[in-house]
Amino acid sequence: MKVKLHCGRVPRFVMALAMVAGVAVSAQAQTVLVDFGTNLSFRGASTPNPDPNGHFWNNYFPGVFFTDFKDINNNATTIDFGPDGTGVGTDSYNGPAGDTSTPPTSSHIAATDIDTVALGNLGVKEAAFDYAASPGPDAPGNTAANLTRFQIQQLDPAKAYALTLFGSHKYSADATTVYSVFNNNTYTSLIGSANLNVHDLVDASMHNRNTVATINGLVPDASGILYLQFVGATGAQGFLNSMQITAVPEPSSLLLVISSVVGLAFGFRRR
């Protein structure tokens, strides 16, 4: 028996299929959130799990190599993360935080000044409150001392990844932090970079409260590793408060979903 559909219903049906396909693709886009600083780090605060948006975080303590990060939905992943041969410190002083007494209290967290909507998934006060900083003295030109490097391990070499980075700090020697990503352990094969003003270029007392840097299309090396580096634009200290890692579905998967929806649409039109 042939099924006859009115022409007016076909677009709605196809739209419904497209919506379902979109949900399926989104489900494949694994997302991981990282907060630099914890309740145990210097003047730090851990992001609660779940956060006010219902998302789950990985709270990073400096100097430790973490394994099997959880994703935004509290599912275990294979992703490992840690420092790569450089020092890294965490603090909250002169960041988006208000009072940075030790230990921070709930009122200090509440005074954190960010635009929670503009920052998207990273717009959580506890995550923005503290930051990772370069280990060296805050002096321009001292690039070697101020480089901070991390490895993001156990990624899928067949996928591309996007990093979304939030850095914020007042009165920095460098107003701009440069984030660079490499796919070799000598940090010579640059595959993506972004600059972010951690405070206003004119008024250093105005920390960044609403802007992130995103680096797309990052393909790990054959071992599944991305190498992340940050430093101030002229070699002074750089800053990183929080980070989002997103795995982008393979192009073949996206094409398969789209072709299936288009095929169904033409199939119904012929009947």
Image (spheres, rainbow, N blue to C red):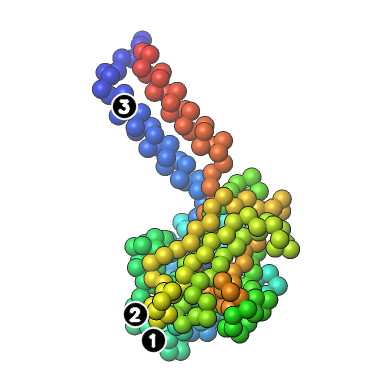
Disc 2 designates what residue?
111
The local crowd at label 3, few if under 14, some if 14 to 19, many if 20 or more residues have their Cα within 10 Å, is few
Which quarter of the rendered picture does the C terminus lie within? top left
Mark 1 or mark 3, which has the lower sequence index?
Answer: 3
C-alpha distance separating marks 1 and 3: 56 Å
Of the pair 75 and 23, the residue shown nearer to us: 23
Q: Is residue 81 above or below residue 267?
A: below
Judged left or right of residue 109, residue 82 is right
Q: Residue at x 53, y 61 (%)?
A: 194
Quarter placement of the N terminus: top left
Q: Quadrant of residue 120?
A: bottom left
Amino acid type at circle 2 is Ala
Closest to the observer, 270 or 239: 239
Asked which secondary structure carries label 3, the reply is helix
Q: Where in the figure is residue 72, as x and y percent of width and height?
A: 47, 58
Image position of 226 (left or right of 106): right
Q: Position of residue 142 (x, y in %)?
A: 64, 79
- Spatial CA distance of label 3 from label 2 is 49 Å
Where residue 3 appears, as percent x and y from the top left, is 33, 15
> Mark 1 = which residue?
99
The residue carrying mark 3 is: 11
| Precedes in sequence: disc 3 or disc 2 | 3
CB under 8 Å between discs 2 and 1: yes
